[in-house]
Image: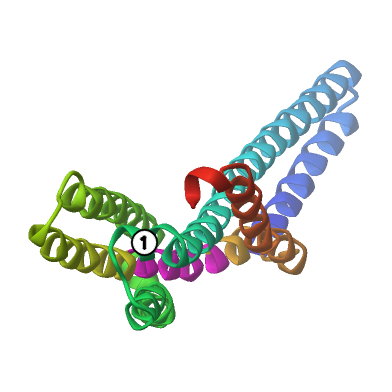
Amino acid sequence: TNGSPHKMGARFIACTADIFEVWASGDALSVHSRLTLAHRTTLERMTQRRGKFFMNDQNNKIVFWGCFIALITTSFAFFSRMYLCGARFKTDFGLDETEVGELMGAGIWPFGISIILFSLVIDKVGYRVAMLFSFVCYAVYLVMAWMAYGAVQGVEGEALAAAQSRGFSLLYWGSFVLALGNGTVEAFINPVVATMFNKDKTKWLNILHAGGPGGLVLGGLITIALADTAE
């Protein structure tokens, strides 16, 4: 495709011409030596190319499973947060139904925004930046959720209402950031996999998106196992 077949053909013709020239001179030993050298060189080149191919293929598989795990994490975070909004968060932070709905929504609508925005600029900023951004978003959410519970821990009486309000704000903006990270994951895993496996993208994209329901199932099973703690 990039000129290599033509170069190989030219080398083959030149090598064949040299061999026939030596053969015409009657030097059979030299003909045998050149044939052996040509065969050995061809095998070495084929081995090197196969090594590069399998090395690239192995790296692609590693990146693919990294994207698969990222999608599982996204689905798991989505399910667990939605469940906690109606269970623990509602009780621990004294939320009414409207506030629960606001908290749930904060983890959904930024998801769509980040998919659209990153899809427009991901070729310019690069996949690595998108991956790092999503990781930072998850870390920020964990810190803000920890701070939200730290705000209400051990607080009683009149100060409890103010502490719960502050905790709700931390959870809300933490959910907002988490949703941005979730959308960023969706924005980069699809072009990454489609680029690596451009000749068989349908197969690998189907396998990749099995991680979505896989994360929901995993989150559900863990929630069932920790039902007493979660409630």
Q: Nearer the viewer, residue 110 or 27?
A: 110
Give percent across and percent down for residue 94.
Answer: 29, 66
Judging from the image, what secondary structure is the residue with disc 1 in? helix
Furthest-left residue in this view: 159
Q: Nearer the viewer, residue 207 or 101?
A: 101
Q: Is residue 113 above or below residue 204?
A: below
Residue picked out by circle 1: 91
Residue at point 86% right, 28% down?
25
Look at the image and tell me whether residue 197 can be seen: no
Look at the image and tell me whether residue 47 can be seen: yes
The 10 Å Cα crowd at callout 1, few under 14, some 14 to 19, many 20 or more, is: few
Total numbered badges shown on the rendered structure: 1
Q: Amino acid at mark 1?
A: Thr
Q: Is residue 31 above or below residue 126?
A: above
Q: Which quadrant would residue 52 be assigned to in this image?
A: top right
Q: Is residue 185 magenta?
A: yes
Residue at point 66% right, 59% down?
208
Give percent across and percent down for residue 101.
Answer: 40, 80
Give percent across and percent down for residue 14.
Answer: 74, 45
Q: Is residue 106 left or right of residue 81?
A: left
Q: Which quadrant would residue 169 be assigned to in this image?
A: bottom left
Q: Is residue 196 magenta?
A: no
Image quarter of the N terminus: bottom right
Residue at point 43% right, 70% down?
183
Q: Nearer the viewer, residue 138 or 163?
A: 163
Q: Is residue 39 left or right of residue 211?
A: right
Q: Is residue 136 left or right of residue 88?
A: left
Q: Is residue 102 above or below residue 175?
A: below
Q: Nearer the viewer, residue 88 or 63?
A: 88
The segment highlighted magenta reads 178-191
Give percent across and percent down for residue 41.
Answer: 73, 29
Q: What's the magenta bit mostly, secondary-structure-wise? A: helix
